[in-house]
Each structure stands twice: as C-alpha cells, then as structure tokens.
Image (cartoon, rainbow, N blue to C red):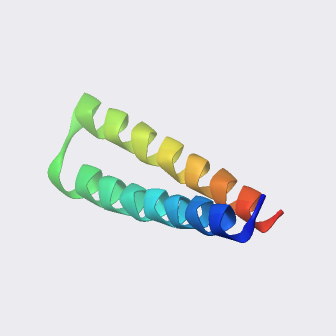
Amino acid sequence: MDAMTKMWVSLIGIGLMALSAVAITFARLKTKGFVRGVLSLIAFLLLMIGFLLGLISIL
C-alpha cells in the first residue's frame, strides 16, 4: 500500500471514530429506550471499523 492510500485509510478511520463519539454522545443525551440502544450499537460498530482502518494504515 502506498503512502497516499495509507493516509486516506487513516483519515477515514479517524473520521469514523469522531462520528462514533458524536453518535454516542447524542444517543446518551437525547434518546431513550430502543433508539438509544440502536444508536449505541451503531456507534460501537463505527468505532471498531475506525480502529481496524487505523490499524491497517499502520501496518
């Protein structure tokens, strides 16, 4: 993988982690019940995908 591709993969990973933080904050402050659970699950999945992309960009 060349340097530019690694840069883009890394930036996408960082963006997904930031989006995850916004989603979990919104879920905890503004929602209740089932919607909160779904948003929390989506935020967790975004965090894991962002983490994996960050790990890929390092290797």
Position of the C terminus, as image quadrant, is bottom right
Instruction: Find the residue positioned furthest to the right.
Output: 59
At 37% across and 58% down in the image, what residue appears?
Answer: 19
Instruction: Tell which of 34 and 39 is nearer to you.
Output: 39
x and y percentages locating residue 12 in the rendered image: 51, 59
Q: Residue at x 75, y 56 (%)?
A: 56
Q: Relative to residue 54, is residue 20 drawn left or right?
A: left
Residue at the image position 52 percent from the left and 67 percent from the top: 11
Residue 48 in percent (x, y) is at 60, 48
Is 3 rendered above or below residue 42? below
Rendered view: 11 above or below 16: below
Quadrant occupied by the N terminus? bottom right
- Whole-percent x and y of residue 8? 56, 63
Q: Nearer the viewer, residue 54 or 28?
A: 54
Q: Position of residue 57 (x, y in %)?
A: 72, 63
Q: Residue furthest left?
A: 30
**For this view, does 17 lie left or right of residue 55?**
left
Report whether 8 appears left or right of 24: right
Q: Residue furthest top?
A: 34
Residue at 39% x, 43% y: name it.
40
Q: Is residue 43 above or below residue 4?
A: above
Total number of numbered labels? 0
Q: Is residue 59 left or right of residue 55?
A: right
